[in-house]
């Protein structure tokens, strides 16, 4: 089976170092191990990088360093993604204040990725968002994209 193309949203980089959330940290480390092992082809975007750069040092450098360490492919800003995100906001799926969350979904969508991986349960990994963005994406001629947390994506050893 060919590797899934996944989009790593900002929270994934954060939880790799989250000492206060050991389960989420462990699942995120496992996800990065699976990326390293070739199970997934990982992507992120300049929108994620902009958010990571707001963190304080040394965490900022640690999070940004994951992009190079795991050879995560980088998607540049895109006007089509911005417009698609505006569709999500206009439909009331994503609040205007959190438009960047819509841009993450749109970036994965327009770049034909398979899955968005996120721990953002407020605006991304949420039933309303999944159903609403899927409806708009299908209307606009894009394929369905999975939206999951790392826990749902990683292999669980029995």
Image: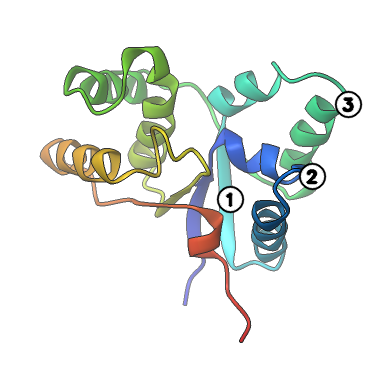
Q: Which is in the foreground here, disc 1 or disc 2?
A: 2
Residue 58 relative to residue 97: left or right: right
The answer, for residue 107, to whether it is visible in the render is yes
- The residue at which mark 1 appears reads as 42
Where is residue 89 drawn, in percent x and y?
Answer: 26, 20
- The residue at which mark 2 appears reads as 19
Residue 27 relative to residue 83: left or right: right
Q: Residues within 10 Å of mark 2 (few under 14, many from 20)?
A: few
Where is residue 3 drawn, in percent x and y?
Answer: 51, 66
What residue is drawn where x is 59% and y is 34%? 10
- Mark sitting earlier along the chain (3/1): 1
Alpha carbon separation for disc pair 3 and 2: 14 Å
- Mark sitting earlier along the chain (3/2): 2
The answer, for residue 74, to whether it is visible in the render is no
Quadrant that contains the C terminus: bottom right
Q: Secondary structure at mark 3?
A: loop
30 over 13 or under it: above or below: below
Q: How is the image coloured?
A: rainbow
Alpha carbon separation for disc pair 3 and 1: 23 Å
What residue is drawn where x is 66% and y is 45%? 72
Alpha carbon separation for disc pair 1 and 2: 24 Å
Q: Which is in the foreground here, disc 3 or disc 2?
A: 2
């Amino acid at each position: 089976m060919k590797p899934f193309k996944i989009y790593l949203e900002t929270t994934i980089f954060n939880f790799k170092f989250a000492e206060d959330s050991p389960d989420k940290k462990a699942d995120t480390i496992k996800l990065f191990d699976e990326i390293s092992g070739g199970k997934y082809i990982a992507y992120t975007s300049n929108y994620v990088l902009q958010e990571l750069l707001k963190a304080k040092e040394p965490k900022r450098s640690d999070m940004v360093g994951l992009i190079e360490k795991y050879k995560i492919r980088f998607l540049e800003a895109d006007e089509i993604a911005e417009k698609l995100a505006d569709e999500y906001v206009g439909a009331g799926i994503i609040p205007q204040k959190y438009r960047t969350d819509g841009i993450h979904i749109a970036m994965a969508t327009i770049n034909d990725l398979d899955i968005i991986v996120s721990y953002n349960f407020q605006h991304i990994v949420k039933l309303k968002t999944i159903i609403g963005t899927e409806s708009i994406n299908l209307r606009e001629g894009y394929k369905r994209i999975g939206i999951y947390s790392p826990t749902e994506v990683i292999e669980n050893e029995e």
